[in-house]
Amino acid sequence: MRWRVTYRGKDGRQADDVFEAGSRAELFKVLSAKGISAVRIEEYDGKKRVVRNRPTGKNSPSKTMVVALAAIAIIAGGALWLVLGGNSGKSTQDVKTERPAKATSAAQPSPKPAVKPTVPEQQPTAPEKPEPPPYEKKPGQMQLPNGKILTFPAPKEGETRKVYAYGHMYECDSEGNFRDITPRKLFHTAFEGNFLALAVEGQRFIPAFLTGLDPKEVRAMLEKNYQPIGDETEEEMAQLKAYDDMRCAALQYMEEGGSFDDFVMDFANYEKKSRETNAMCLREVMTLCKEGKIEEAKEMAGAAKKLMEQKGLRPFKLPPHVQAAFDELP
């Protein structure tokens, strides 16, 4: 037997094809082997399709029944027409003419109420804020340039206190008066300011702010020699001398083949080792002082001084009151 099979191909399109099989069961085996999922299966005789799903026998409608159903539909339609207008004996045109005619004259519109002109509402104006009274200085108060007022407790009578505010240093006396004692900036570039902290003993500097720069630019900045103006204080002159000594040492280090970054890191390690060694020795000295062993503490301080000199570190330093107590000893 030959079968006409409708199925969907791999591309998604519907396709028809004819297969030979002895029965429908054998046909399913053939389709399954080829990976085909059938949508519709029909027997094929080469001329016309034989639809298997078409109802046959007693349940199929006959031609006589179809004709009877059509006649019933025509009779029902005629009855509906008679109900709507056929019994009056009037044509459709007559029916239309009996409809009430539209009024030829338009109804007079009702008069609209007079609209009063709208007056914009006046927004309430905010009352003007009174100007603040002039600032009256009080003891312990300080007014910054931006108008902000700071209050600090005044020190005891005869004493002074240093106050830091917005990058400035102030000195406050016992009466609450402030005096700006901010040190003058000797240098204004970031490199020179950080290099000054490197040069002055006791000041902390950050190596990352001095390393990683262009060697040519660094050399050009180090070759600048600061010329005093003439009104520098003794402390400022000491800082300028330390800056000049460190500047010359860095240039000499670079002339001998070293890099400026190595110079900074070597000096940072030197400062770190000096601080650590000084703190270790000072801790031993202060421990002996607390135990009342003043003579042994003085000997320990002398040994620490020699140790620092042998290692080439900064001189060993004692607190002023401890040094004064050692000087009073015979």
Image (tube, rainbow, N blue to C red):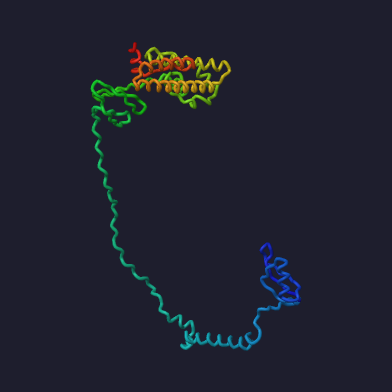
Q: In which quarter of the image is residue 299?
A: top left
- The residue at the point 75 percent across, 74 percent down is 21
Question: x, y (%) of residue 126?
Answer: 26, 44
Image side of residue 52 versus residue 294, left or right: right
- Check the image and report above or below for 265 versus 95: above
Q: Pick the residue in front: 153 or 187.
A: 153
- Check the image and report above or below for 224 versus 69: above
Q: Quadrant of residue 215?
A: top right
Looking at the image, which residue sits at the far top? 330
Question: x, y (%) of residue 139?
Answer: 24, 27
Q: Quarter of the image containing the C terminus?
A: top left
Question: x, y (%) of residue 33?
Answer: 72, 67
Question: x, y (%) of residue 319?
Answer: 36, 19
Q: Pick the residue in front: 50 or 133.
A: 50
- Check the image and report above or below for 148 versus 291: below
- The residue at the point 31 percent across, 29 percent down is 144
Q: Pick the residue in front: 80 or 214.
A: 214
Image side of residue 129 versus residue 26, left or right: left
Q: Quarter of the image containing the N terminus?
A: bottom right
Q: Quadrant of residue 157?
A: top left
- The residue at the point 23 percent across, 33 percent down is 133
Give the number of callouts: 0
Q: Pick the residue in front: 309 or 10.
A: 309
